[in-house]
Amino acid sequence: MTPTLVRHHRHADPYADSSADSSAPVDAGTRARDWAEIQERMLAPLYEAVYDRLEVGAATRLLSLGCGSGLALLIAASRGARVTGVDTDRERLALARERLSPDPGHGAPPGRPAAERARLLVGGPSAAGGADEAEGSYNLLTSFDPIGCAAGDSEGLTPALESAVPLAARGATVVLTGWGPPERCATAAVLRVAARLADPSPTPRSGGWRAARRDDLEDVASRAGLRPDGSGRVSCPFGYADLKSALRGLLSTGLFDAALRATDRSRVEKEVAEALHPYQRPDGTVWMPNVFRYLVCVA
């Protein structure tokens, strides 16, 4: 299983210089790499639990919606699946291409070469078209970007699913994922800071944090015309080597963007750091237990 505690990173820390202009945004490339190197692996237990349950392997033809920097695709490809990923974030997608490209220094991966097993495309589901004719239609659609933490996120996923389902074979499996109950997710306390800084009004605007609801995934499935066929919960603790890594990882998620627009970066970092203090251990590491849900559906 992929470890969730990150102890080192290859690039310079964009948050290290407190004298820098706090209103200047971190560039998109740096933030994408923070996501790929620090934050994305926190969801690896979720990816693996879903793939174990569905017995993902050589017969799987997967379309991943919002594939990000490709860790979930890499895990599926390592099991022999033929994978396609779509995302509108070009920086994250570039990192996914790096991950899924064959590494001549380490020999070819098992089964098909990675370049033959993976397609990575900029855009929404329509960019994917149908699966390779020789392989048949997609038989698994996944949305691993967890819903249930931003106002409007569940409604926003419905159009993407409606575009993706016609690309899949009849009876294909669709997997939706979301945050678990707030009382089981320590990170919810930190996300409340983002909501308060972005919008102090009692009713959050679209994109602002809100607590996950019990039926978020079922509501999405119903709107998209999907039939639920099982569900599960997975422990996904967020673990960081230190406070600086935690800030970098959390701010790479996009969940703090509204707060960064409403105020300045130094204030967001300061208040998030304060919210993280109860989860910092004596050795400096930060550890926040969380639970995520997944819903298995039939198209």
Image (spheres, rainbow, N blue to C red):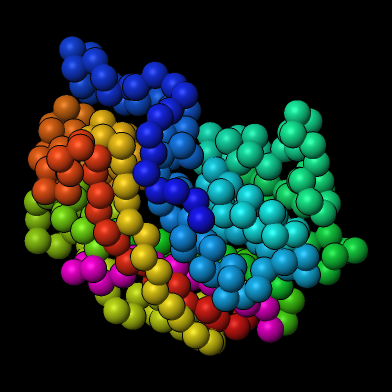
Quadrant of the rendered structure where residue 269 is? top left
Relative side of 177 to 173, left or right: left
Report the side of 220 relative to 152 (left or right). Answer: right
Q: Is residue 181 magenta?
A: yes
Identify which residue is drawn at 80% across, 41% down.
108
User: What type of secondary structure mainly makes up the magenta span?
Assistant: strand
Asked if residue 26 lies left or right of residue 258, the reply is right
In the rendered image, residue 76, in percent from the top left (x then y), is placed at: 65, 58
What are the residue bounds of the magenta stretch?
171-184
**In the picture shown, does residue 9 fall above or below 93?**
above
Give coordinates of residue 13: x percent, y percent.
34, 22
> Foreground: 34 or 88?
34
Q: Identify which residue is drawn at 85% across, 65% down.
A: 135
Q: Is residue 223 above or below residue 78?
A: below
**Residue that sits furthest to the top in the current view:** 19
Image vertical order of residue 19 relative to residue 198, above or below: above
Snapshot quadrant of residue 167:
bottom right
Q: Position of residue 119 (x, y in %)?
A: 73, 49
Does residue 150 belong to the magenta stretch? Answer: no
Q: Is residue 144 visible?
A: no
Does the rendering let one see residue 215?
Answer: yes
What residue do we see at 20% from left, 36% from top?
284
Q: Is residue 17 left or right of residue 92?
A: left
User: What quarter of the picture does the C terminus occupy?
Assistant: bottom right
Q: Residue at x 18, y 12 (%)?
A: 19
| Position in image of residue 258 (x %, y %) | 25, 43
Q: Residue furthest front?
A: 283
